[in-house]
Image (cartoon, coloured by chain):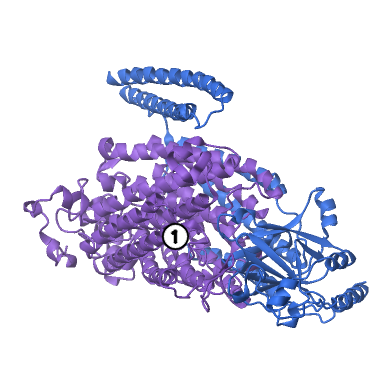
């Protein structure tokens, strides 16, 4: 019979492929050794092509294997048929059982993912609003996991239980208005709760009522391909005006030094912020859209050219505390770019340090101002540098405010 | 019985004696105006594009899994884009951009809607062909041209568009910002305009065919769910795609004619651009006004196909037919007012964010109804696991898994930290990627006999399903956790950040799963092309289905039915009806032939029919119960 012939042909072919594959591996090993010994350019592509051919043949081998099994199955089924025996393999049972198996293994897989990969995710939120976000996340996670598990048990369970047997007729059940109403209203109610919570959290993040005794520190972040510029407001607490038309190699941000608020603005290489003090981020971009993303603080907002956006948050855990909490002495807070912005997108980062108020003030004093002598010339300002204004009145005031706040909290 | 069908009035009437007009190879296979041939053209082009896009994804998955390793073979094929065997960062971005564009538009929109709307609309509503066969042909050829232009961008000096598939300006508007925004982006925009034209011509055709050309008795509430899905998909497309064209035209103006619709206050290095007054956010509004309906354009046909296939193979009516339709309508309407959830963190007014969050989460309700109805359809069914059925069940599983993570992302507060991370990747690859492709594959296995008159091999189908199903979960499930760790998408390598190093091993698992899943598609491709020529010849109604397409002859003639178009008497889901002899009653069987199985609600309040049924029942109670056939 032709089938048998077919199989034997296939077997011979398979053997041939196995042999070639082995021959190739050994040849490849030798060639690789030779290539390593003599590092010559241009690269000798011989071994590479051989590896590719090796994998291609290995795949062909798998295909042959599948083909052989397929043929064997059909031969088996044909012989069962020829002998008038019941059909050899019941694919309905096999697939139904596979679904049941998939359910069990899948549930374990989900458990494994939740516990193993679930332990590798971000540590607890290091900001006030972040805690609310985390709480919302957990509630949503619990609800969706319940739905996820139960619907999958039903889906694969039904697939297993109600697989075709030939003994039974399906139950004609076109609709049931009560049940349909229930499963429209219940999700609607659950979602209403989630929407309300989400809406309130969202409002609390973006609509902040400013506490006059605890004014936020203003920090401006400007993104460009592929770097971040951080500008501190300086002693006056106000970030000065910018104009993109003033940008040149000296004046990278295009600060308009006719605006007095610009005179004391300081540049920084990293973002240092005091703990428990609100920070108001002023986000701008020089060229394309970037996204300012501080995952540990649950802060993200795009930086858009031609538009200024704001995000206010209050860090609650210092870097040192987080090192202890995560048990990782190398832990760093950082911010990074999270909107495709060009080929250097994957390496735009800056470190963030959350420190005590005292450390912050000491650090801030050391940061240089933007205004240089060259810029003074450009803006016709007196070159003989006026002594830098007295250190940080507003900051001092704010510190006091924090203290009183803390006392009040106690 | 009435014999005149209204829709035969136009010239399709005499299709039997069409032999005289000779069909050449060109008119039959290339510039065909027959909806079935056009469907096949869409399908095969879609499959080719899918294979290409899958290949691109394997390339960038290699980079993600082994960022430090060289694959010299890549240089052989990619030349300067993979110098020394490592994909370059800008080419990596081109890969993800084109992968996304092809998959979303060419595979899951044209390949899915184009194939099954064209194939099934005339067949399932009982029409000889589309309302405008010529427009239909144009629709395919515009699509084909769009594909060719998109692919041609791989053969130009500056490379394909690489600003992400959403092509946000200014990145996509400034050739100096990224090399892909040069000629590659121009080609992308041209391709997209052609694509939208194609999809509009298709959509207008689908809607007018469904509204005007239904056979006698086929009222809207007797249409299969597939047709409802295609209908609403086409409506969505017609209303939203033109907005994309508007956006694209403005982008072309900004790129080529110096306007400032999307550009303002831009400095590249120290070069100050003159543009002022535009807003990049405008593009995002225009793009997502299409972009969000687009994901429903992708998923609704898959939902329709799965509903039909699950009902046929469970041998049970679809549970809650009306609820299924109302939920589709609900999704259609809501999908127009949720686009802002893609923009929660763009700096858009937070008040808008709150509103879009509410509308977005409401859309979960009709989705939940659909899911529960599918589960109820399986309950106490008599499930035959054809490959199509497996893929339909897989579709439901992916839809649940991916849909649930949408509840996180639709919540503006949670989106702050999840936006543009791998969590988003995992979410939409499950809910609209895998689910839609599984719906499409289910449709291919199920309707293969209607396209080629043969059956695909089911065992290879099982193998294809199980490997793909398992590997798709292995690929996308772990990615959620990368997102929860704050790993952004579209990163060329995880080497620059300390905290991402731990995910490289996960990436290796994901890449291997992706490679295995890709290789499993060889089983499908072989099965598909082999079965076209050598598959087992199909019977007329291989699945025992009720819908009209299975009353056409296996030979798939031009004009679909050799004689007159059949009349429809009942809804398409009378499976396993109590009292019926077989476990299915086709739509063409009148109630007068099924007196034993008729139910009061079948007559939709028609008192005359109810009276006849009552009389018959009364009579049969008295007489012996076996002479039911006398009454025909």
Q: Secondary structure at mark 1?
A: loop
Q: Chain of mark 1?
A: B
Q: Colour of chain A?
A: blue
Is A270 on the left-hand or right-hand side of B603? Answer: right
Q: Position of residue B238 (x, y in %)?
A: 36, 69
Q: Position of residue A86 (x, y in %)?
A: 38, 28
Locate residue B192: give its quadrant: bottom left
Q: Is residue A15 above or below residue B452?
A: above
Q: Is residue B381 visible?
A: no
Tell which of B125 and A51 is nearer to you: A51
Q: Position of residue B364 (x, y in %)?
A: 54, 64
Tell which of B399 and B27 is nearer to you: B27
Q: Is residue B170 above or below residue B522?
A: below
Is B466 on the left-hand or right-hand side of A235? Answer: left
- Which residue in the protein does label 1 denote? B182
At 15% from the left edge and 58% from the top edge, which residue is drawn?
A: B564
Is A66 on the left-hand or right-hand side of B558? Answer: right
Q: Is residue A394 above or below residue B162?
A: below
At 44% from the left edge and 60% from the top edge, which residue is drawn?
A: B182
Could you classify mark 1 by the number of other residues whose Cα lies within 10 Å: few (under 14), some (14-19), or many (20 or more)?
Answer: many
Q: Is residue A158 above or below residue A57?
A: below
Locate residue B145: give its quadrant: bottom left
Q: Which quarter of the rendering shows the N terminus of chain B?
A: bottom left
Q: Colour of chain B?
A: purple
At 27% from the left edge and 49% from the top edge, which residue is drawn?
A: B626
Q: Is residue B131 visible?
A: yes
Q: How many marks?
A: 1
Is A384 on the left-hand or right-hand side of A37? Answer: right
Tell which of B403 and A55 is nearer to you: A55
Locate residue B223: give its quadrant: bottom left
Tell which of B27 and A253 is nearer to you: A253
């Amino acid at each position: 019979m032709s089938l048998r012939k077919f199989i034997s042909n296939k077997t011979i072919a398979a053997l041939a492929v196995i042999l070639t594959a082995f021959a190739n591996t050994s040849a490849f090993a030798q060639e690789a050794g030779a290539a390593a010994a003599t590092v010559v350019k241009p690269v000798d592509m011989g071994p590479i092509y051989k590896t590719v051919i090796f994998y291609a043949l290995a795949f062909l081998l798998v295909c042959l294997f599948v083909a052989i099994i397929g043929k064997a199955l059909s031969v088996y089924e044909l012989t069962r048929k020829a002998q008038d025996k019941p059909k050899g393999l019941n694919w309905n049972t096999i697939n139904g059982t596979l679904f049941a198996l998939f359910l069990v293994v899948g549930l374990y897989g989900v458990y494994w993912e939740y516990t193993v990969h679930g332990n590798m995710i971000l540590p607890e939120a290091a900001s006030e609003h972040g805690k609310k976000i985390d709480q919302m996340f957990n509630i949503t996670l619990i609800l969706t996991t319940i739905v996820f598990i139960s619907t999958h048990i039903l889906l694969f369970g039904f697939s297993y239980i109600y697989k075709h047997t030939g003994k039974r007729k399906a139950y004609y059940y076109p609709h049931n208005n009560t049940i349909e109403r229930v499963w429209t209203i219940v999700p609607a109610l659950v979602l209403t709760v989630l929407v309300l919570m989400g809406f309130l959290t969202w409002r609390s993040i973006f609509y902040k009522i400013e506490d006059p005794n605890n004014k936020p520190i203003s920090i401006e972040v400007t993104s460009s391909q592929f770097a971040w510029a951080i500008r501190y407001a300086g002693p006056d607490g106000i970030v000065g005006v910018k104009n993109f038309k003033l940008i040149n190699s000296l004046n990278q941000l295009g600060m308009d030094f006719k605006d007095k608020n610009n005179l004391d603005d300081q540049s920084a290489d990293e973002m240092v912020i005091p703990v428990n003090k609100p920070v108001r981020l002023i986000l701008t971009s020089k060229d394309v859209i970037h996204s300012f993303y501080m995952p540990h603080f649950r802060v993200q907002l795009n930086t858009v050219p031609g538009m200024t956006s704001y995000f206010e948050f209050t860090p609650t855990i210092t870097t040192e505390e987080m090192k202890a909490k995560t048990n990782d002495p190398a832990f760093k807070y950082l911010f990074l770019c999270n909107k495709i912005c060009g080929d250097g997108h994957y390496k735009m980062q800056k470190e963030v340090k959350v420190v005590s108020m005292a450390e912050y003030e000491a650090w801030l004093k050391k940061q240089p101002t933007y205004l240089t002598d060259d810029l003074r010339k450009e803006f016709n300002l007196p070159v003989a540098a006026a002594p830098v204004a007295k250190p940080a009145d507003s900051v001092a005031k704010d510190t006091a405010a924090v203290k009183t706040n803390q006392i009040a909290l106690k | 019985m009435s014999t005149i069908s209204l829709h035969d009035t136009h010239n399709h009437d005499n299709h039997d004696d069409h032999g005289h007009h000779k069909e050449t190879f060109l008119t039959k296979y290339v510039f065909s105006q027959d909806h079935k041939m056009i469907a096949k053209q869409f399908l095969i082009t879609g499959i080719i594009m899918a294979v290409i896009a899958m290949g691109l994804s394997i390339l960038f998955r290699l980079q993600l899994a082994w960022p430090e390793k060289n694959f010299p073979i890549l240089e052989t094929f990619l030349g300067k884009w993979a110098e020394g065997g490592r994909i370059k960062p800008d080419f990596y971005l081109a890969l993800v951009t084109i992968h996304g564009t092809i998959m979303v538009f060419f595979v899951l929109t044209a390949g899915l809607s184009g194939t099954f709307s064209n194939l099934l609309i005339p067949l399932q509503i009982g029409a000889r062909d589309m309302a405008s066969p010529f427009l239909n042909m144009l629709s395919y050829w515009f699509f084909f041209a769009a594909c060719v232009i998109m692919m041609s961008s791989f053969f130009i000096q500056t490379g394909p568009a690489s600003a992400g598939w959403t092509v946000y300006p200014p990145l996509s508007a400034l050739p100096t910002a990224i090399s892909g925004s040069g000629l590659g982006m121009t080609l992308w925009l041209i391709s997209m305009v052609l694509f939208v034209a194609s999809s509009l011509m298709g959509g207008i055709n689908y809607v007018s065919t469904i509204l005007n050309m239904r056979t006698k008795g086929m009222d809207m509430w007797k249409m299969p769910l597939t047709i409802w899905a295609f209908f609403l998909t086409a409506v969505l497309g017609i209303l939203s795609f033109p907005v994309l064209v508007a956006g694209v035209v403005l982008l072309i103006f900004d790129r080529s004619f110096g306007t400032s619709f999307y550009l303002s206050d831009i400095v590249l290095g120290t070069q100050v651009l003159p543009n002022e007054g535009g807003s990049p956010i405008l593009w995002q509004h225009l793009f997502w006004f299409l972009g969000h309906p687009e994901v429903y354009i992708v998923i609704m046909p898959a939902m329709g196909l799965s509903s039909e296939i699950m009902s046929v193979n469970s041998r049970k009516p679809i549970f809650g037919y009306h609820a299924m339709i109302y939920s589709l309508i609900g999704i259609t309407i809501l999908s127009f007012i949720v686009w802002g959830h893609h923009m929660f963190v763009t700096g858009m007014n937070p008040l808008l964010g709150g509103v879009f969050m509410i509308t977005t989460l409401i859309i979960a309700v009709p989705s939940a109804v659909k899911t529960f109805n599918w589960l109820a359809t399986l309950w106490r069914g008599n499930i035959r696991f054809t490959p199509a059925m497996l893929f339909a069940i897989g579709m439901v599983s992916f839809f649940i898994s991916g849909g649930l993570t949408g509840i996180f992302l639709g919540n503006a507060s949670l989106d702050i930290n999840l936006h543009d991370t791998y969590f988003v990747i995992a979410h939409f690859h499950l809910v609209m990627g895998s689910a839609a492709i599984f719906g499409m594959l289910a449709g291919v296995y199920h309707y293969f006999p209607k396209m080629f008159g043969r059956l695909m091999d089911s065992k290879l189908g099982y193998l294809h399903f199980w490997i793909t199903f398992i590997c798709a979960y292995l690929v996308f499930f772990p990615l959620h956790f990368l997102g929860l760790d704050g790993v952004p998408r579209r990163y060329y390598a995880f080497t620059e950040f300390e905290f991402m190093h731990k995910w490289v091993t996960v990436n290796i698992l994901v890449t291997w799963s992706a490679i295995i899943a890709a290789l499993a598609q060889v089983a499908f491709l072989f099965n598909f092309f082999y079965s076209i020529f050598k598959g087992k010849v199909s019977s007329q109604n291989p699945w025992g289905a009720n819908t009209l397409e299975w009353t056409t002859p296996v030979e798939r003639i031009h004009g679909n039915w050799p004689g007159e178009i059949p009349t429809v008497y009942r809804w398409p889901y009378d499976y396993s009806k109590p009292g019926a002899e077989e476990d299915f009653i086709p739509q063409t069987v009148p109630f007068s032939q099924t007196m034993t199985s008729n139910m009061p609600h079948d007559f939709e309040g028609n008192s005359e029919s109810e009276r006849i049924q009552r009389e018959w029942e009364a009579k049969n109670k008295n007489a012996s119960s076996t002479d039911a056939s006398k009454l025909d």
